[in-house]
Amino acid sequence: MLSEKMQDALNAQINAEMWSAYLYLSMSMAAADKGLKGVANWFAIQFKEEQDHAQIFINYLLSRGGRVKLASIADVETEWDNALAMFEQTLEHEKKVTSLIHNLCAIAAEERDVATANRLNWFVDEQVEEEENARDIIDQLRMIGDDRLGLYMIDKELAARVYTTPSPLATAE
Ligand code: MG
């Protein structure tokens, strides 16, 4: 059985993942508004991935006989100065999510909940990737500075990102 404490913490994480989805959807629209189709694509995929993260936690709670409680999703910002500001906020946000995941790991250890700890391991790895991806794009954007052609090239590169179903959902199908 899932402990009450673990269940509450997992439900809070579902909300955090949905808020992340909302944030990236907002960034995707803000980027489209600036004519940055590639950046918009990158964040649209990020939006889907965050919904997937929530779904993974939902599936997990259900598989353990837990109760899913969906809470309201708080407002997100709607305007950013430029693409760099979006990716800088993405990195800061993902660092916060990483600490939330690590906190869940600590609760799972406290509760001697090995199954949850196992499920969380996928998220631990995923967060390393999330931070690395944002950091890489920030580095590129800082490198080009105010160069419009550079921004055009990076936008083209980000347009090539394609969505792939994360493995915990792919194997559940
Ligand atoms: Mg996430």
Image: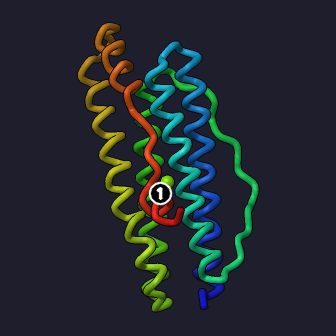
In the rendered structure, which amino acid carries the disc numbered 1? Val
The crowding category of the residue bearing disc 1, from other C-alpha atoms within 10 Å (few below 14, some 14 to 19, many at least 20), is many
| Residue lying at 58% horizontally and 81% vertically, measured from the top left | 6
Residue 173 drawn at (x, y percent)? 53, 62
**Extreme-front residue of the structure:** 173
- Image quadrant assignment for residue 150: top left
User: Observer-nearest residue: 125 or 75?
Assistant: 125
Colour setting: rainbow
Quick one: 84 or 155, which is closer to the camera?
Answer: 155
Q: Check disc 1 and report its element: helix, strand or loop.
A: helix
* Disc 1 CB within 8 Å of nearest ligand 1 atom: yes
Q: Is residue 142 left or right of residue 70?
A: left
Q: Foreground residue, 91 or 11?
A: 11
Q: Residue at x 33, y 12 (%)?
A: 146
Whether 116 is drawn above or below 87: the answer is below
Residue at figure coordinates x 71%, y 77% from the top left: 67
Image position, residue 131 (x, y; %): 35, 48
Q: Which residue is mark 1?
A: 97
Q: Residue 48, relative to residue 156: is it above or below? A: below
Residue 10, percent from left and from top: 59, 71
Please say if 73 is above or below 160: below
Q: Position of residue 138 (x, y in %)?
A: 32, 32
Above or below: residue 143 compared with residue 70: above
Total marks drawn?
Answer: 1
Res 32 → quadrant: top right
Viewport quadrant of the N terminus:
bottom right
Q: Quadrant of residue 156?
A: top left
Can you name the residue that lies furthest to the left here?
143
